Amino acid sequence: MAELSEEQVRDVAMLSRLELTDDEIRHYTKDLGSILGYVEQLNELDTSSVLPTSHSFHVENVFREDIVRPSLSNEEALANAPDHEDECFKVPAVLQDGGGA
Amino acid sequence: MATYEPVIGFEVHTELSTATKIFCGCDITYGAPPNTQVCPICLGMPGVLPVLNRQAIEYTIRTAIALNCEITERTVFDRKNYYYPDLPKNYQISQNYASLGLNGYVDLDVNGTTKRVRINNVHLEEDAGKLIHPDIPGADYSLVDLNRAGTALIEIVSEPDIDNADEALAYMQTLKNLLEYIEVSDCKMQEGRLRFEVNISVREVGTKTLGTKVEIKNLNSMKTALKCIEYETRRQSDALNRGEKIIQETRLWDEAVGATRAMRSKEDAHDYRYFPDPDLVEVHITPEWREEVRAHLPELQDAKRRRFVEEYGLPEYDARVLTSAKKTATYYEHAVAAHKNPKSLSNWMMTEVLRELNARDVEADEFPLKSEGLASIVRMIDEGKISGKIAKDVFAKAVETGRAPEEIVQSEGLLQVSDTGEIEKFVDEAIAENPDMVAKIQGGNAKTIQALVGQVMKKSRGKANPALVNELINRKLQS
């Protein structure tokens, strides 16, 4: 089994926007490593003839029709937001860089 | 100094013309107040389940077929994970492992020659929300409107087969036209419903090795995309000539400066950790379903052009111009439906209407004079109510003010005078005032008749029926 490094845990924490102390990094390196080791047991099985699967049951083509349903009101939509202004969610400043779609 | 040429590929995003979002029933009509077209699903609330919009899948199949793609029979959706405030779930549902359409192509007509551009893939995903940066200096916050979040979005990814700006423009126009023809998107660029990203590298002329590519975002018009291609070609060529290396990066077009700039470096930016979305099940596009979509493709440009020639008796050239944009073709067909003079309407389209559309940089569906109005102008000419010259003035006024052409003709007293008595008065005056012209006409100079007709038209302020004037002059001078 490949060892999980502290560096990898730092990367994953960064990608998940988690701020961890050095102690926590050491702790999770050990914990995550043992979880991965446990899951790695699956590699002992020969799955070369099994198609990749994302579900344990086979259901396909679940659709909805293209019909408008009521949305939330603006007040409801913003009700749980820590902060809002002018009908919008208010967030720390972001530059125009980024965004993925 | 070596000479470099660009190698260009495109990623084109278009929002689909569905009534609702891709995974929930929220309305997507443009221009609603912020955060009023949102629900627990598109807001990314815990515990909700997305359910795929059937129409969005059909439109994607249609697009993939129109782009000559192979249709992936079993397709799935994946999560693309990244943190950004316009994406409430912290992942975008997209297709990474099994895009719906693969290995297609589109043929471009570039200055009379055909150029084939390969399509790597066509896939379906959800759009993100909109960030608003307050127009206050030093503001330390941004505002988020999630009305757009979850709108069905198609991404069309080309191979780097485009060699210059002419081909790039033809590609963008051809794709927009095709998407409009197959009725999957209205492609309104000013509403952000069609967006371009360019991948560009340069290579020394005569070589075949691809250089390092740069991806450019934030191109909101075809004009901007072309400026960006020109700028990047020069920037990369200059850098290579100075012995520098091109860095593979994402850059943004800065319209104010007219240049691209590097995005703040985020080394991890491309680690999206895709995995199949467990909330969504497989989509099985059977050959029967695929063929049914193919059989119901709306009339494409070539078919429409041929029909215009057959049904309306138009010359090939007219048919080509009128079908060059779906909205122009629709405008024309509505006008012909209102007044059956296809050739005359075609002439008006190809001269007056297209000129005005270009000058205003709008498309036919946004033109202030509606197709019925154009039809009524031609009808008034055909019925002898107005002269061709007056018709041009009426057209200009109708376009300028949005008033109905009949109303302009009525209220400004522009009806053509076909009353012989009234015209005769002008003819007599003109003959009396221009003895030299009369002498020339009687001396056999037929051309001078037109000059005399012109005098009469002037007296009638353009309202006399020219055919009648001609006839009267002939009759009076021969007797």
Image (cartoon, rainbow, N blue to C red):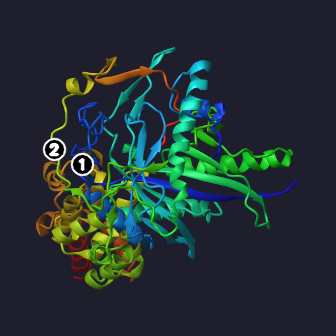
Tell me if mark 1 has few (under 14), some (14-19) or many (20+) residues whose alpha carbon lies within 10 angstroms of its own: many
Quadrant assignment for the C terminus of chain B:
bottom left
Identify the residue under disc 2: A69
Identify the residue under disc 1: B20
Q: Where is residue B184 in the image (x, y as percent from the top left)?
A: 32, 60
Tell me if mark 2 has few (under 14), some (14-19) or many (20+) residues whose alpha carbon lies within 10 angstroms of its own: few
Within the image, what quadrant is residue B372 found in?
Answer: bottom left
Note whether B258 is above or below B210 in the view shown: above
Say if residue B478 shows up in the picture. Answer: yes
Say if residue B218 shows up in the picture. Answer: no
Note whether B254 is above or below A63 in the view shown: above
Between B367 and B22, the one lying in front of the other is B22
Q: Which residue lies at the image location 28% right of the left edge and 62% below the top edge?
A: A60
Please state which amino acid type lies under the numbered disc 1: Thr
Q: In this view, does B472 lie to the left or right of A53?
A: left
Q: Where is residue A87 in the image (x, y as percent from the top left)?
A: 28, 23
Check disc 1 and report its element: helix, strand or loop: loop
Please state which amino acid type lies under the numbered disc 2: Arg
Q: In this view, does B351 lie to the left or right of B250?
A: left
Q: Where is residue B111 in the image (x, y as percent from the top left)?
A: 57, 71
Q: In this view, does B50 lie to the left or right of A21?
A: left
